[in-house]
Image (cartoon, rainbow, N blue to C red):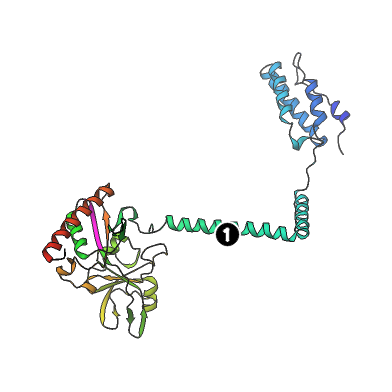
Amino acid sequence: MHKTKEHIDSKANFPPEGGIKGGTPPRLAEKLLIWFLKDELAEEVLGDLDEKFYSTAEKNSIRKAKRNYWFQVINYLRPFAFRFFKFKNSNTMINHNFKVSYRQMLKNKGYSFINIGGLAMGMVVAMLIGLWVQDELNFNKYHKNYDQIAQVLRAEDNGEGGVSVSNSLTTGMGTLIRESFPDQIENLFMVRSRTQAPVVGNGELKFREIGVFLQPEGPEVLGLEMIYGTTQGLKEKRSILLSESLSKKLFDDENPLGKNVQINSSADLLVGGVYKDLPKNSKFSNATFFSRLSLLLGETPEAFNVWNNYNIDVYIKLTNNVDQDQLSSLIAEKVKGHYDDWAKESGQT
């Protein structure tokens, strides 16, 4: 049963026992509250406000009690408390909007197709661009020494007033750079520029796989994540590191450390470790194995001091706080001077 306005308005506001001189709740505030407040809330709210009023008046003053009473009344001026405010069923509104939209689509099929198709295509293109940008920004960042690793490139006049840039260097250049800048370069390794695709086998199991031939320091500089063994697994002269996927193809789920694999059915290589497959946004993502560069070039010092065969990539790990622009200039000056001397001595000018 709902309380009527008259019933609520006639509610007696009794002060605490003993009374409070000159103190009753402000009548105007009470009337305002009864006017806008829902019937089901009015009796309880008025009772609470009266109780609070007399408590404040007794502890402080009548003036403060009246001020607080007005503040509480104003605080109830919210939609949930208004007797004339009705909440609409949100589900009904949503269903209505869907029905209207659906009817409009059926009425204007061509226009709707263009709008919806254009919106969908725009969203797809935006997502693809976002994925591409994310991939580019994270390129090679899988390698833990990303901030310190740099590749040495060769720039030269192309004869047409421009500059051509190439990543292919000679082993002589790599060796010279390693020996000339020990304070700026923490580590250096050379890689065969072109990847190789030999047949890798274990007994009857044989697969043509893409591999990278590099110096033994390479896996440590790149920070390969090892499953078996360590990044020092290429220290042996005839050794190989297998990717996780190639290891499973050759040895299933066995630990292949210390076992042999064959390259092109002839060279036996000792498995020195197994690393997790590299992500697609790594420069070496296609490599299913790493092996020693000396298997292709030979172990002699002369093989790593060649100046007329551009088939090597050179990667360096910089020491901390190195000025890369300054180091680039020093490397260019050093290599050019040494190359000019070599060219004169060998008659290559």
Q: Quadrant of the C terminus?
A: bottom left
Q: Nearer the viewer, residue 132 or 329?
A: 329
- State left or right for residue 242 relative to residue 19: left
The range drawn in magenta is: 183-189
The answer to which image quadrant residue 42 occupies is: top right
Q: Quadrant of the N terminus?
A: top right
Q: Is residue 230 above or below residue 39?
A: below
Picture coordinates of residue 291 (x, y %)?
A: 28, 71
The answer to which image quadrant residue 246 occupies is: bottom left
Please name the amino acid that badge 1 sits on. Val
Residue 193 appears in the rendering: yes
Q: Nearer the viewer, residue 51 or 337?
A: 337
Picture coordinates of residue 98 (x, y %)?
A: 75, 55
* Residue sitting at x 75%, y 36%: 79
Picture coordinates of residue 267 (x, y %)?
A: 25, 80
Q: Regarding mark 1 in the picture, which secondary structure is present there?
A: helix
Q: Nearer the viewer, residue 66 or 128?
A: 128
Q: Is residue 184 magenta?
A: yes
| Number of residues whose C-alpha sits closer than 10 Å to that of mark 1, classed few (under 14), some (14–19) or many (20 or more) | few
Q: Is residue 94 magenta?
A: no
The answer to which image quadrant residue 208 occupies is: bottom left
Residue 181 appears in the rendering: no
Specify the farthest residue to the bottom.
204
Residue for badge 1: 124
